[in-house]
Image (spheres, coloured by chain):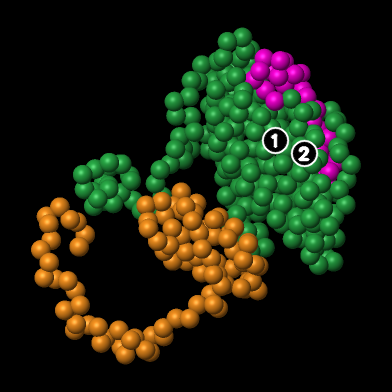
Chain colours: A orange, B green
Amino acid sequence: MTGSSWPLYEVFVRSKRGLNHVHVGSLHAADDETALRHARDLYTRRNEGVSIWVVRSAHITASSPQEKDPFFAPSGDKVYRHPTFYAIPDDVPHM
Amino acid sequence: MSTGNAYEALNDAAGDARWAYGTGFADPLAGVDTRLPDGVDGADLGAYCLMLGDDALVMSHRLQEWVTRAPELEEEVALANVALDLLGQARLLLARAGQADGSGRGEDDLAFHREPHEFRGVLLAEAENGDFAHTMARLLVFSTWRLALLDRLRASRDPVLAAVAGKGVNEVAYHRDYAAGWVVRLGDGTALSRERMAAGLAAVWPLTGELFAAHEVETRLVAAGVAVDPAGLREEFGAVLRQVLAAATLDAPPLPVPGAAAGRSGEHTGALRDLLAELQGVARGLPEATW
């Protein structure tokens, strides 16, 4: 198969039990409408989704790996930003 | 879901519901009464299930032939999904056929161990694929017709047929939408895509007459409230096709004249024989194989 000339799209799916859309992958499509169709066909085949977002990959501005340390390291030692002084009840999972 | 604890509701571990993805699969025949309805001839019902099942099985196989050959990976998966939907319908219908006619044949027996003249599908399904535009023309015609049929079949007196139709309506509505999108895109596209779309439609159109011809089994089952009268689908079919073709800026051919129910009577073309040679080859060559 030759390289696709169609633009790349990123796909976000909200699952039945999920509260927000999660990035699940990417695909090529001729336009926005077919991107949505392709996303349905590629990423919700196992009954996963209730809502799909697609966006042209070119429209996403991402942080670069080179900036990783200046971007994220400064928050690494600020433990006081977590509310660790609260007592957690026993029946609260996943904290 | 009422629990005393909001976190429990989010963390419901019962059954497969703990999975965030891919849950809630439903058996389309769950709770359906599989006994034959009163006053319905089992042989007729079996034959009718074969007709609708063979349409789906053979059409599914034609679409599967695109796998590894589609113009784009995304389209390949889309075509395979449509094929899988139809295969699922075929399985339920063939299983019902073997049960209703009293022969006890399973879905595999009926799919893999019948000869071409024992198949009851329409010629539209078995014709060669042609190019992508040709395939989209065929899929649009097939799913427009089948959607109209399944929509009415939901009121069938046979609870299994009604359940299969209920499941199939959503599937085939998507197939029709998918095909219509491509017919519009190609018809109203470049000079080359338009030419190919028109050629695909012209190749498919002569096969549409058969879709509206009633076989005697269908006529008897329509009277019994089990089957759908194919003649009654013609108007809706014509209206949908006119709408799609207008959007595609293509000329709508005149409504098809009901032809002879050739495929329903077991009269097929060489295309079906070749298709079955591939579809049935493994099962016949390795009769002990399981999968």
Element assignment for label 1: helix
Quick check: B47 above or below B144?
above
Q: Is residue B137 magenta?
A: no
Q: Residue at x 71, y 29 (%)?
A: B120
- The spot of residue B286 in percent (x, y) is 53, 38
> For mark 2, does the 10 Å Cα neighbourhood hold few (<14), some (14 to 19), or many (20 or more) residues?
many
Residue B271 visible here: no
Q: Residue at x 63, y 61 (%)?
A: A34
**To which quarter of the image does residue B229 belong?**
top right
Q: Are marks 2 and 1 in contact (CB under 8 Å)?
A: yes
**To which quarter of the image does residue B39 belong?**
top right
* Residue type, label 2: Phe
Q: Badge 2 sits on which subunit? A: B
Element assignment for label 2: helix
**N-term-proximal mark, 2 vs 1:** 1
Q: Badge 1 sits on which subunit? A: B
Residue A16: assigned label? none
Q: Nearer the viewer, residue A62 or B66?
A: A62
Residue A11 visible here: yes
Residue located beneath label 1 in the image: B148
> For mark 1, does the 10 Å Cα neighbourhood hold few (<14), some (14 to 19), or many (20 or more) residues?
many
Quick check: A9 above or below B206?
below
Residue located beneath label 2 in the image: B237
Q: Nearer the viewer, residue B247 or A45?
A: B247
Q: Which residues make up the magenta segment?
A: B203-228
Left or right placement of residue B100 versus residue B184 in this view: left
Left or right placement of residue A24 versus residue B74 in this view: left
Quick check: A89 above or below B192?
above
Q: Nearer the viewer, residue B7 or B76?
A: B7
Separation of marks 2 and 1 at Cα, in angstroms? 7 Å
On the rendered image, what quadrant is the C terminus of chain A found in? Answer: bottom left
On the rendered image, what quadrant is the N terminus of chain A found in? Answer: bottom right
